[in-house]
Image: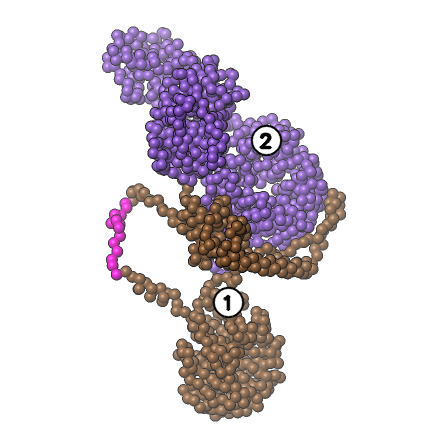
Amino acid sequence: MVEHGDVRVVHKGGSKINFREPALSTDSRFLLCASGESVKVFSTATEECLHALQGHTDLITGVLLRPSNHLQAYSCSLDGTVRLWDFTDGILIRWAKSNRVNIWCCFIYVWTVHLHVCACTELFQLVAVHLPQCGEQLVEAKELSAVLSNISSNPAASAFGREGQYIVSAKPLQLEVYFFKKHKSYSFFLKKDNQKGGKNTFTCITCHPTEDCIASGHEDGKIRLWRNFNHRKEYTYSTLHWHHSAVSSLRFTPEGTNLLSGGVESVLVQWRYNQESQRDFLPRLGGAITHISVSPDGALFCTSHSDNKITIIQSCVKVSAVIQGLVKGDRIRTDLMIEPRSKALVLNGKPGHLQFYSLQRDKLLYNLDIVQQEYIHESGLEQFEVVMAAFDASGSWLATVEERKQKAPELELNLKLWAFDDQKQSFVLNTTISAPHEGRITALCFPHVSDGQTTMLVSTSRDGHFKAWQLAAPAHTEDEGPSWSCDFLGAYHSLVPECCCFSADSSLLAVGFQEVVTVWTPASWELLTTLSQPPGAVRDLCFGRLSCSKYLLGATTSRLLCCWNLLTCSLEWVTSMDVSLLLADPLSENMAAFCFEAGSTDLFVFKPGEPRPLFSHKALCSGRVTHAVFVPREVMLESCDEASQWLNCSHLYFLTQSMDLLTFITKAEEDKLTASSKQLVVSDDVAMTPFHLLLGKHRDQLENPQGSNVSLPQLLQMPAHVLPSASFLCSMFVQSLLISVNKPSEQNKEKEEEMESEKEEEDSDGEMESRISRPEHMPSGESGCAAPALTKEEVRELRRLKKLDHSWMKGLLD
Amino acid sequence: MASYKPTNIPVYPKLGEKVTEETLYWKNYKTPIQIKEFGAVSNIHFSPVTPYNFAVTAFTRIHLYGLLSQEPVKTFTRFKDTAYCGRFRSDGQLLVAGCEDSVVRLFDVSGKVALRMFKGHTKAVHVTDFTSDRYQILTGSDDYTCCLWDIPNSAQLNTYQEHTDYIRCGVTSQLNRDLFVTGSYDHSLKVFDARVDKSVMTINHGHPVESLLLYPSEGLLVSAGGRYVRVWDLLKGGQPLVSLKNHHKTVTCLALSSNGQRLLSGSLDRHVKVYNTTSYKVVHNFDYPAAILSLALAPEDESIVVGMTNSILSIKHRKPSEEAKETAGHQRRRPSYRVYAHRKSYVPKQDDYLVSKPVRQHLAKYDKQLKKFNVSKALDTALETWIRGRKPEITVAVIRELDRRGTLKNALAGRDEQELSRLLSFLIANLVDARFAPVLITAAEMILDIYQSIIGQSPVVDKQLLHLQSLLERELDYQKDLLEVLGMLDTMFASSLPKIELPCSGISTSNGLPQGQSTASRPQILAA
C-alpha cells in the first residue's frame, strides 16, 4: 500500500446558492447569498461573482443586510458565530461568538440593538442576542434571551412585524404572535384539513411593513391575510387562492403595495394589496421557487429556485439576470462525463436537461434541452428523465436516453443522437429513436475512434438484447443528412446484458451478460469468446488502455475484481473487493476502482499489469461513490513523486452520496495555488491610489518604513466612504505620521510633514463624500495637536460622529 | 423566463415506398385515360417525328392516335386476321405490320390501302421492322425464319433459318443498316449481319424471349423473357452484364425513357418497373389493372402508353411542369394596389444599436389551450375533423401530452354523446396502428372507465363500442398469426445460420461455464 502523504481530497466548485434567501443591497447593485462556508457577492448587472466573504468554518445559515449601515451585512453560521462584513470590499469588520448554540438562521430588526437568531439546540428556539458595543473585533455574546421556543426550523415560517413590534412564528397548524412591548403572545389555530380536503399546514409567513397584517402561505396553495390579531377572539382573515400546491415563499414589497408569492409551479405571482383580484404573473422561471427577496428600494426582486439558481427580476416584469450554480438534483442519473471539445463536466441538470459545467471557471456554461417538452411543475407527476448519456471520442456525437414511467409496464424510452454543429457551437438533434428497446437501457457506449467519424453506438437493455446502431447515409438521393439506424441485434442465451465496453482500439466489444462476459468483434459481429467467473453477475467492465490494452477488467456483484488476459483468454488475477465503480484514465494506463467497504468508500488506483496499486485512499467519504470521471489536464504535471504520479495526466473528480463534488489535489499544486493567491494580495497592496503615491513617496524618503505602526495601513485599506470627515481625521493622521519620524532630523521632517499633510488634504478632499463640509480655517501650519476653538458646525459634526460606531478607530488611536 | 415549449409532434417514418426524386418524377402523371380496344393490345409504337402519333396494334386493326387525342385519328383495318407489330419508319411516313395470315403489309400513313404486301412466310408474322436505310424490312415469323425484304420491288432479299422456335421479337440497328437482332422462343438471341448469310452472334437468354431492346449507343442489348430482364454487352461479344428478376410473371415488353437513363419493363404480373440504367435498381413501380402486353413512352416521357390483355389501352400524360404553373399563379395573385414600406425610409447607420423586437412565438391552437391548462379544449381542438383525418399523429401527440401531464382523465370526462362518438370514431380509426397503439390503448381504457355507467343509454355510442370490440378481437387474432409466422421464421433462420465454433480456451480453468453457441441473428427479425 502506498501512503497518500501529499495528495488531499478537496471540495471543488458547484456549491449550493439556494440554501437561504439571498439579500439584495440597498442600491440594488449587489446580491449576497450564502454558499457553503462563504458568502458570495454577485453583481446584479453582470451576474459575475465579485468576491466571496470567507471566514466561517461551517455552513452559513443566513445573510442579512445591516439596517443601520447599508454597506454592511451580517452572516450567521452553524459554527455559532455571527459576523459583520463590509460586503463591497469583502472585509470582516466584527464577529460575535456564542459558544452555546448553533445558529440556524438569523433575523434582525432595525432599531433593536438585539439581534434575533434562531438557534438550534435540541429544540429550535428564537433567541435574542445582544451584541455588545465594544471595539474589539471578536466579541463574546453572553446576553442570550429566549423569545420563543419550539419554532419551525424553516426560516420562512417566522417573521418580524411592523417596525419590529411583534414577531410571528408558524408551527404546522398554529400561528403565534408575540408582542415585544406587552410581552404577550397570541396563538391562532387552524384545523388540519378544511372542508374541501386541502391541507391547512402553514408553510411560510410574512408581515406587512406598514400595516398590521400577516400573510401566511399554506400547503394547499392558499394564502391567508390575517388582521386584527391582537385580540384572541376577534381576529379575521381573508383567503387568496391561486397556487395549486404549497406556497413556499411570500414577501411584501417595501411600500407594502404588493404581495409576492411563489411555489412549486415556478410562477411568481404579484397580488395588489387590498385589490387582491388583480394579479400579475411571471411564469416559467425554472425550478420550484424556494425563496423570494426584495431589494430595500423595491426596484429588484430575486427568486431562488430549487435547481440552484437565482433569478433577478426587474419590477416584476422582466428577468434581468440569472445566476446559475451547478444543478444538483436529488439524484444524478447520468454518469459524470467530460465533453471532449470544451472539457466541460456534463451531468443531469434541470429536469430534462444536460448541464455543461466548466470546472476551470466554476461556472455553468449552458443547459442542453434533451427532452424538449414543457415541464409541468407539479409534484408527483412522472416526468421524462435523462437517464443516460455518452459522448464519442471526438465530441461530435452525443447519445442520450430518456425514460418515463420506469416501473410501470408501459415504459416510454427515447434514444436521441445529437450532432455537434460547428456554426451553432452546440449539439443539434439528429435522430430520435422511440422505443429502441423493450426494456430499460443498462449501458450505452461509443467506440474510441481517435481519427475520423464515429459511426457506431452500442446499447444494452434489460430485454436481453444489445443493439448496435449505425450512422448511415440515406439510401436515396434525399436532401436530408445521414441518420442512425439499427445495424445488429445480439443476444446470448437470453441473459440480461448489464454493461458493455469497447477496447482501446475499438476492435473488440465486451458485453457482460450476468455471469458471462462475451467478447464480440464489431467488424463482423461474431462472438469471439466468452469469459466468466461465477458466482456473481458482472457489474462493471473496463478495458485497459495503452500498454495494458490486452487486459479486460470486470467487477462482479460477488465482491470480486477480475482481470482477464485477452491474448490467452484466461484469468490473470482476481482480488476480493466490492467495487462500486471502475474507471479507466483515457490518457494513461491507470485505472481507478472505488470500493465500498464498511459504510465508506476506498479508492485504489492501479495498473492492470502491475500487482501493487499506485495509490490508495481509505475512507474517502461515507456512502457509495457511483459517479466519477477522469478529467484530462490542460497542462501535464511532471511530478515524479510515486504517490502523485497518477495525477499527472488527469484530475479525478467524484460525486459523493451527499452530492458533493470532490477532487484530488497534490501538495505541489496546492502550494502553487496559495502562492498565486499571496501574490495577488501583494499586488493588491500596490494599487495606484493617491494614498499609495503619497505613502510610497513618504516611504522612499524614510528609507526604512516603520512596521510598528499598524493603524496606518488599516486606515488606508478602509474605503473612503466609511471614514469620518477628513477634518476629523486630519490631526490624527498627521500625528500618526509624526511618530514614525526619526528624532534627529525632526525639524526638517516636520516641514515635510506639513507639506505632505497639505497635499493629503487636497487629495482626500477629492475622495470624500459631498456630505462632509470641511472647515475653511483649518489650521494648516500646526501639526494638529492643539486645535483651536471649534465652530458650532464642527461640534455638531463631532457629536454625530460619536454616535456612530467607530470601534475600528480604537486601534488607530493608541 | 423560458418560452413555452410546444407539444412535440413525432415524425413517423413513412411506411411503404420512400419519396425520392424518381418517384416524384414518375408520379407526376395525370390519371390515366383508358380506351377500350377490340382485343388484346399487342404492340404500341410511337412515330419518330412530330406530332408523335402512335400506332396501337390490337386484334385485326391498327389505330393511330394523336398524342393528346382520345379518338383514333386513323385506322388500318385491312387485315384478314390478327395484326401484329405495327411500326413506323424513321421518317414517320410508312407503317409496316405483320399478320396472323403470314402476309406483311406496308401502309402509307396517309393512305388506307396497303402499298405493298410481302408474301413468303408460311405462318403468322409477329416481328416487323424497318432497317435504318429505310428501304428494307425485317420480318420474323412463327415458321422459325426471319427475312429481309426490299421495299421498292417487294422482293425477298435474304432468309435466315437458324432459330428452332417461334420468332417473337426483333430489332434493327439504327446505326448500321445491315445489323439486326432477333429473339425466339428457343431461348436464344441471334445477331445477324445482312452481308453474311449466317448469324454473327448467339446469346442464350435461358427463357423464351419476349422482347428485345437496343440502347441508343447499341453497345448494350436488353432482352426480356420469362421473369428475367437481361442486359448483354454486345461489344464484349455478348457478355451478360446484369440479370434483373423483379417481376413475378413473364416480362412481355421493354421500353427506354427518352434520355436513356431509365429502363421500363412491363409484365403479365400487371406491373411496370422503372430501372436506373447505371445501378439497375428498381426506382419506381406502376400498377395496372390487367396483365401488360405492350408499353411505349412518348418522346420526353410526355406520356406512358400501356396496352393490356383485357384490351384496354391506358394513356398517362405528364402534368404541366411546376414552373409554368407557378408563373401563372403569380400573375393572378399580383395585387392591383401599390405597397408602401412602413417606416422604411430610415436606414440604420453603422454605429446604431439595433434593438430587436422580441419575436412573437406562434403556437398551434391546441398548444395555446395547453399553455393555459385548458385540457378539454385542447383535446377538442386536436380532434377537429381535418386534424383527426389528415394528421392523426397530432391528435395522438396531444393525447400523449395530456397523459404526461396526468390530466387525460379530466380531458376525456364530461363529454356529451356527440363528442364521445367523435372520440370513439377516432379510436376505431387509429387504435390498431402500431405507432399510436400504446397511447390510444391508455385513452381507450380511461374512456371505458369513465363512461361505463352510461352504456346502454345511447344507441350511437353502443354501436361504436361494439365496433371497437370486434376490431380488437380481429387485431388479437392477427397478432397471434403474426407471432406464429415470426416463430417459424426464427426456426428457419436458426437452422440456416452456420454454427460458429468457439475457440476453446483449454488452459483456462476458471472458465467453467460450458461454451455456448451463439444465438446471433441478423437484423431481419428486428422488432418493428
For residue A195, say whether it is visible. yes
Which chain is disc 2 placed on? A
Instruction: Return the residue at label 2.
Output: A644
State the residue at coordinates (53%, 71%). B271
**Spatial distance from mark 1 to mark 2, Cα to Cα?**
67 Å
State the residue at coordinates (52%, 53%). B455
Q: Colour of chain B?
A: brown
State the residue at coordinates (40%, 25%). A235
Q: Quadrant of the C terminus of chain A?
A: top left
Question: Is A593 situated above or below A723?
Answer: below
Residue B465: image x %, image y %? Answer: 53, 56
Nearer to us in this view, A652 or A486 = A486
Chain letter of the purple region: A
Magenta-colored segment: predominant secondary structure: loop
- In this rendering, the count of numbered labels is 2
Could you say whether the residue bearing mark 2 is in a helix, strand or loop? loop
Look at the image and give the residue range highlighted in magenta.
B336-349
Could you say whether the residue bearing mark 1 is in a helix, strand or loop? strand
Instruction: Return the residue at label 1.
Output: B284
Question: Is A209 situated above or below B220?
Answer: above
Residue A602: image x %, image y %? Answer: 63, 31
Q: Are marks 1 and 2 in contact (CB under 8 Å)?
A: no
Query: Which residue type does callout 1 highlight?
Result: His
